[in-house]
Image (cartoon, helix red, strand yellow):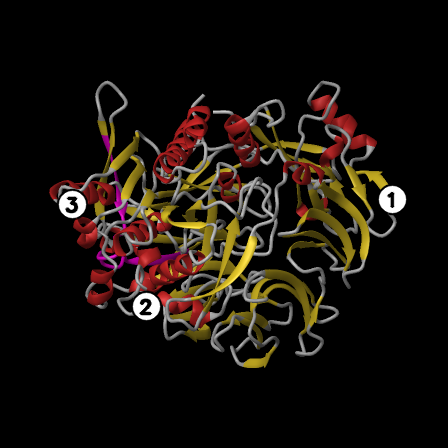
Amino acid sequence: MLLGTQPGGLSGQESKVALFGSMLKGEVLGTTGVQAVRWLPGSLGYLDEASGQGGFVAITPRTGARAPVFTAAVVAKLRAEFPGPDLPFTRFDLERNGTAIRFESGGRPYLFATDSLRLHRLAVPAKVGPLDLATAEPGKYSPTWRHYAFIRDYDNLFLLDTETGAEEQIARGTSEDNLIGFLGAGPWFVWSPDGRRIAYLKADQRGFHQYPILRDLDRKATVERFRYPFTVDPDPPLELHVYDVGTKRDVVVAQGNPAMPFLRDLEWVPDGSELTYQVVSRFENRLELTGFDPRTGVTRTWLVDTSATYLDPPNNFRVLADGRFLWSSEGSGWRHLALYDRQGRKLRQLTSGEWVVNEVVGIDEKAGIVFFTGVTNLGLEQHLFRVRLDGTGLTQVTRDSGWHEVSLSPDQTAFVDRHSSLRTPPSVTMRAIDGTALRSMATSDPARLTALGLTPPELLTLRGADGVTPIQGMLFRPADFDPAKRYPVIVSVYGGPHTKAIRDRFETTDFRAALAQLGFLVFEVDARGTLGRGKAFQSGNYLRMGQVDVDDQAAAVRQLGRRPYVDSTRIGVTGISHGGYLTLMMVLRYPDVFQVGVTGAPITDLRNGPRQYIGRIMRTPDANADGYEKGDVLGLAATLRSRLLIFYGTNDHNAVVANTMQLARKLIDAGRPFDMAVYPNGDHVLGGADGIHGLKTTVSYFLEHLRPEGWEASRAALWQ
């Protein structure tokens, strides 16, 4: 495949495939300037790592003055410890309020105190169990850096003394079924701010099915088993513990119960006086924010939040120095911020309206101002906002339309603004806290995009299947698009409840834009059930997964098909994971609309799905029998009329292989033709050689069955 080959010098379809590859690798947009920017604690400076080893520079935002990050004494000491012309690292993290740096050299972690010039060689655990990537929780250093907490063999929590190397087991599971932590309940363990205590979750998962994964690439195949939480499984008994490192006392703080089984989101208040956690109902429609005082053993309820459907993060829980706290809720139908006192009484609403508060990014407690990002314009744009804690002065700080990702300075006097829009390539600008530009830090040169004939995708506003609800779409065209011709269409879909695909943001590596260069129109829609449009829109597929969302997709494609350059007899759809599930529902329920489907790692029976993902939208089969029946791929399999390619990895711990095998059996029994690609030991998201092969296979399938102009030559070039 000509991935990364420059289009210049090639001709015809080879050139198109080369452009496809270059776009996937982000090679068609040149960007210059400071890319790695991190604020220095307690100062106005930020870090420019572009200068390389030994040349780390702090830059003052308003003046542009540059100064070395490290003193001559620090550099001399590090070079004495690590002989050589350069410092022993190219990246580092600032710790202990900027008085120490943490880095890796030669595969080992170090902590270097820049004030005392003392180097600590941090010990690491000798062996950590083979935690599945979907559930693994990384080890964590205590705030003092004296201890390192980590999980070994799934079920045992250890403390490692980083100075002596001694290990201490502080929590022991009865077996691999009694785990430290639980999928979807993170974080699994958290240190108190003073490093004296550690809180952790423990889950008895013996009620979950022990799912087998066949390892058959070795001469003698083996079987790995892991506990998988199906939607039909009982709730796991959860326990919350607090361990005192000094006294070695372990206290059970809370246990889940049948009505409120889930414990999650462990967090210490800034002064360490309380551990807060959330107690959540079975269907995640009730949440109790709870506090535990480790000195007295007393627990109390801070706040109760409820929803007619389900509660969705983030909560933006932030505790202020005086004990008041922030909380965001969707009670009004849109996520907004409110201020509460320590007793959980609502003091005032800080924001309101038909837009969404996303994330609190900074609080200036002295000035009484909260900074946060918010999503506006029907979810298309993200901006930085500010509001006073007294509820006045709500201001949109960033003005340029599009998508802004921001990083505030520690003293909230400046911020880094990473901005782009569909028509504006990415830029990085240093701004004063009022939004005034201080200096440009990085820019993009769109000249090559123009030279290649690449144009931004078109934003469309369509109507959902109900004929009323506005839904948004995006259409990508090839660089040589000719409106007098008729083109096949590929619909890209994910459509999960925690995602949004249609944004006014420039994507430097976009599969959709790249795929269009092979002669397709590529189309994507945010149907009901997706983020950024308020609770009613996001809950549009509540209890009806695979119904309303699929209806909206078909309605949008039919509206697109009215355009003269769209060939409605050549329409395909592709998606992975939840998008794989929707792909199957789309080709099975609307074969007249979608003639070709490529599905990857799909859920084919919602009862085979993970409870923490599907359960909150669909509840259980007993509580929502009609929804599970109508959203069932397997029940529709015998009606397949479209061309279908299924691909999956045999090491998928998310959408387990049983989904694909059960679908294959249904299709075979019904005598329906289909194609399949298997990736031995491949994960839920294919990577490496599997990912490249899966990409080629997907594209090749669409070339063969949708047949854009020059498809045979494109397919041949794809596999070179």
Front tag of 3 and 1:
3
Task: State which quarter of the image contains the C terminus.
Answer: top left
Q: Are marks 1 and 2 in contact (CB under 8 Å)?
A: no
- Looking at the rendering, the stretch of residues picked out in magenta corresponds to 223-241
Give whichever of 110, 243 is nearer the camera: 110
Question: Between disc 3 and disc 1, whose residue precedes?
Answer: 1
- In percent of width and height, residue 552 lies at 38, 62
Q: Quadrant of residue 312?
A: bottom left
- In percent of width and height, residue 89 lies at 66, 29
Position above or below: 170 against 406: above
Magenta segment: does it hold 614? no
Labelled disc at residue 260:
2
Give whichever of 6, 244 is nearer the camera: 6
Q: CA distance from mark 3 to mark 2?
A: 38 Å
Give whichever of 382, 42 is nearer the camera: 382
Tell me which amino acid carries mark 1.
Answer: Ala
Labelled disc at residue 278:
none
Label 1 CA crowd tier, 10 Å (few <14, some 14–19, many 20+)? few
Tell me which amino acid carries mark 2.
Answer: Met
Tell me which amino acid carries mark 3.
Answer: Lys
- In percent of width and height, residue 13 lies at 50, 29
Question: Between disc 1 and disc 2, whose residue precedes?
Answer: 1
Labelled disc at residue 65:
1
Q: CA distance from mark 1 to mark 2?
A: 55 Å
Label 2 CA crowd tier, 10 Å (few <14, some 14–19, many 20+)? some
Residue drawn at x 42%, y 24% is 716
Q: CA distance from mark 3 to mark 1?
A: 68 Å
Residue 299 visible in the displayed image: no
Front tag of 1 and 2:
1
Labelled disc at residue 666:
3
SS type, badge 1: loop
